[in-house]
Structures are given as C-alpha cells and as structure tokens.
Amino acid sequence: MTKHGDLTGLLQAWSAGDAAALELLAPLVHQELREIARRMLANESRDGRWQPTDLLQETYLRLLDWRAVHWQNRLHFFATAARMMRRVLVDAARARRRIKRGEGIVPVPLDEIDVATPDPHVDLLALEEALESLAAVNARAAQIVELRFFGGCTVEETAEALDVSARTVTSEWNMARAWLLQRLSEGVEHAR
C-alpha cells in the first residue's frame, strides 16, 4: 500500500503534466474510487442504469478532461472525484427527469442521516438544488456535506481537507443537515 505522501506526490506530478505519474497513479486510486462509486450507487434504484464500473469510468473521463488542476493532497483528489461522481449521477437524473417531466420525486429525510452514505430515498435533483442554495449562503457547510455525505469522509478527514477543526466540521455538519432538511421539506410542501 502506498503512503499518503507518495500518492500526493504522484497527484502533483500528474498536475504538472507528467503522463508517467498518471500511469502509476491510476492503480493506486482505483480501489478507493471504486468504493466511493459503490457507496454512491448502493442506494440508487436497482434498475440497472449504473454500475460502479460505469460510474468510475465516467468519472475517470471527467478527471482526465480537467486541465490545470493543482491537486493539494489525496483528500482534495478524492473529494473532487466524489463531487464528479455526484455530478454524473445528477446529470443522469436531470436527463431522466426531462424525459419523465418530473415524475417520481421523493423527499430526502436528512434528519435521519447519521452515516456518510446516501439515504435510499434521496432525490438527487432536489438535494443538488438544496446544496446549491446552501453553497450560496455558506460555501464551507456545502463542502462539508459533499465530503461527508458523498465523499464518505470522516469528520477528521473533512477537517483536514478544509483546514478547520473537527469541532467546526461537526457544528457545520449539524447546521447544514438541519438547513437542508428545512429546504427539502419546503420542496415537498410545494409538490403537494
């Protein structure tokens, strides 16, 4: 297993344009990225739209298209990858919504979420809209939700990634969950 510093060094070399670093990096990050994809898809509907491998491949394509990104460390990379995976799923959900014209929207009960994996009844589009609204009010709280909820990061990992204390992460995580619950509840009321 590689040390975090080795991974960070490879990420930074890749950022600098070193193609050989990318070849060394891919097998080192593959398993963790696959686990993030598996976690994200664990609660998706079982209609066969996405498999972890499919989500991972689409994420790889998006990561490879990014130019001039300067990876700070492994947490920065994995948080960005998790955000890209979320974007892939949100984009797919938006496409399905356009086709279905809004059918099947289910509210998100965020007050019951205690772990860093998505709830089985998450409406990704409603959550995405709520996260965008939260980011406009409190960007760091939105980042905390992305890292914890989508990225599967612990409080400590999130604190390290954002360069804040674990206490700040816990406080803002609780505030963000309450804020999102309120926002998503308002959306349910409008849908009725």
Image: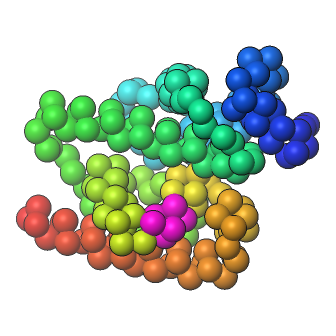
Report the colour scheme: rainbow
Q: Which residue is located at x 10 percent, y 66 percent?
A: 190
Q: Which residue is located at x 11 percent, y 61 percent?
A: 191
Picture quadrant of residue 94: top left
The magenta stretch is 139-144
* Frontmost residue, 191 versus 85: 85
Residue 189 in picture, x, y percent from top left: 14, 70
In magenta stretch: residue 79:
no
Q: Is residue 156 left or right of residue 37?
A: right
Predominant SS along the magenta part: helix
Picture quadrant of residue 138: bottom left
Whether residue 108 is situated above or below residue 29 in the rendered picture: below
Q: Is residue 8 left or right of residue 136?
A: right
Give the quarter of the figure containing the N terminus.
Answer: top right
Q: Which residue is located at x 33 percent, y 36 percent?
A: 91
Whether residue 55 is situated above or below residue 3 in the rendered picture: above
* Frontmost residue, 78 versus 14: 14
Residue 50 in picture, x, y percent from top left: 44, 28
Residue 32 in picture, x, y percent from top left: 71, 39
Whether residue 27 is situated above or below residue 44 in the rendered picture: above
Give the quarter of the figure containing the C terminus.
Answer: bottom left
Q: Is residue 35 visible in this depiction of the protein?
A: no
In magenta stretch: residue 142:
yes
Q: Is residue 20 left or right of residue 47?
A: right
Q: Is residue 77 visible in this depiction of the protein?
A: yes
